[in-house]
Amino acid sequence: MADIIIKNAYVLTMDPDLGDIENGVVVIENGLIKEVGRSTGSTADKIIDARGCVVMPGLINTHCHAGMTLFRGYADDMHLKEWLEDRIWPAEAKLTDDDIHIGSLLACLEMIRSGTTSFADMYIHMDRVAQAVKESGIRAALSYGMIDFGSKEKADAELKEGSRFVSQWNGKADGRITTMYGPHAPNTCSREFLIRVKEQAVKDKIRIHIHVLETEAELNYMKENFGMCSIHFLKDIDFWGTDVLAAHCVWLSDGDIKILAEYGVNISHNPVSNMKLASGIAPVAKLIASGANVCLGTDGCASNNNLDMFEEMKTAALLQKVGTMDPTALPARQVLEMATVNGAKALGIKSGVLKEGHNADMIIVDMRKPHLTPLHDVASQLVYAASGKDVRTTIVAGKVLMEDFMVTCLDEQDILGKAVQTSKNLASRIDS
Ligand SMILES: N[C@@H](CCSC[C@H]1O[C@@H](n2cnc3c(=O)[nH]cnc32)[C@H](O)[C@@H]1O)C(=O)O
Ligand SMILES: [Zn+2]
């Protein structure tokens, strides 16, 4: 007997062979998808009737700083450099383990509510982020963010903590937690340090998550200090590969795009953050055309200011269209691929598609709403008309984390109360 059968659903499998199944079933057993099709002979403990709904792979947020939910609305309308150096970094210096735990639980709640089933995170106090992931039931690829600013002492300490985190948490929570190495960026980490991190990551068979060319200032800094941009610089030190997740990649030349595609680098596009911080427009259409794996992230809540991947999908499509002055750029299906299949590839997880043998990570979106009526094209509706608030049910590893808009995995009211209190206490500590 299976665990769950979802029936009467429009099944958006995101699998090129299976395609969309207009009135289909999904069968879940032992955390995995057992069957996807028009009907099933199986029976299950739990039957979910998804009439009028779409069942689809859960969305994968490939660039996040979950603990930063506590800074939602704390520092807006600023340039990245001042935003980080004058507001965010001094505030982060006052964050405690408990703060990060509550902030991460809040992030998990928000993601589960808005249809995200996996996220990639780079932050500090990562044990408590991992604890929040473990408790909530969501899936995540976690990294301790490392910055050395050219100091050998700092480099040693950061790599030690990064490695400790990897060895402590990789594969934990029944495999829902994977880990990555998180060197912050080419302009905050030294060349020597980046080389060491890459060596360690290869040795440990662990992926890498890094910010690359988010701003024009980084491009100028790299040119001044190394006579080349970050893409060529990282090529020069043998950093690139399919094991790397590079966030942002806004300031690329055509030559850079070729390099990223050639090395099979995974690129997390984060359009809302890029627009809010006025960082620029990443050449996503060109990257995809060149064969690069482009996925989608929200970035942290201090530069977004929410974790709604539906909003991110719509923004990605619109930004590419206006950026290239071409309304055919980044069509709805392609954006959905970025947020599902491509994200899974970037994190190295067997999710992002509804297919037998894959992780049972999926969401049910309720389409019986005024703003989702009439329904001519499901992909178009999901990207251009829906929002995270339309997600009715969220399932990760075969466990129902939210059902009929009720979060079942965490005590939502308790976390909301604690988050308010935590951010108040934090604000007064920052001011003192
Ligand atoms: N171990 C490091 C922290 C690095 S964590 C990752 C860092 O990325 C920062 N961050 C968040 N969003 C962005 C962004 O858009 N660009 C660059 N950095 C960001 C975040 O605030 C955090 O400080 C230290 O002790 O300073
Ligand atoms: Zn970031």
Image (spheres, rainbow, N blue to C red):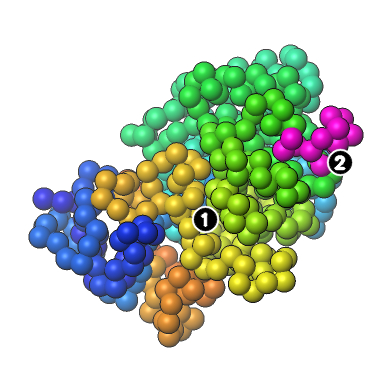
Tell me where residue 113 appears, x and y as whole percent: 45, 59
Tell me where residue 202 appears, x and y as whole percent: 53, 22
Q: Magenta stretch: residue 231 in it?
A: yes
Residue pointed to by mark 2: 220
Residue for point 59% across, 56% down: 289
Q: Tell me which corner region of the image, top left, top right, bottom left or bottom right, holds residue 364.
A: bottom left
Vertical position of residue 419 compared to residue 235: above or below? below
Nearer to me, 291 or 247: 291
Dot 1 amino acid type:
Met
Which mark, by number, is residue 66?
A: none
- Image side of residue 216 versus residue 93, left or right: right
Dot 2 amino acid type:
Asn
Q: Examine the residues drawn in magenta and state their main secondary structure.
A: helix
Gap in angstroms between the C-alphas marked 2 and 1: 29 Å
Q: Tell me the element at label 1.
A: helix
Tell me where residue 254 appears, x and y as whole percent: 73, 50
Residue for point 37% across, 54% down: 353
Part of the protein shown in magenta: 219-232
Of the 4 image quadrants, the one containing the C terminus is top right
Q: Magenta stretch: residue 227 in it?
A: yes
Nearer to me, 391 or 244: 244
Nearer to me, 383 or 332: 332
Vertical position of residue 333 compared to residue 165: above or below? below
- Image side of residue 21 versus residue 386, left or right: left
Q: Is residue 99 at least partly visible in the picture?
A: no
- Image side of residue 225 versus residue 6, left or right: right
Mark 2 and ligand 1: say if the CB distance to the nearest ligand atom is below 8 Å: no
Residue for point 86% across, 36% down: 223
Vertical position of residue 26 compared to residue 372: above or below? above
Which mark, by number, is residue 338?
A: 1
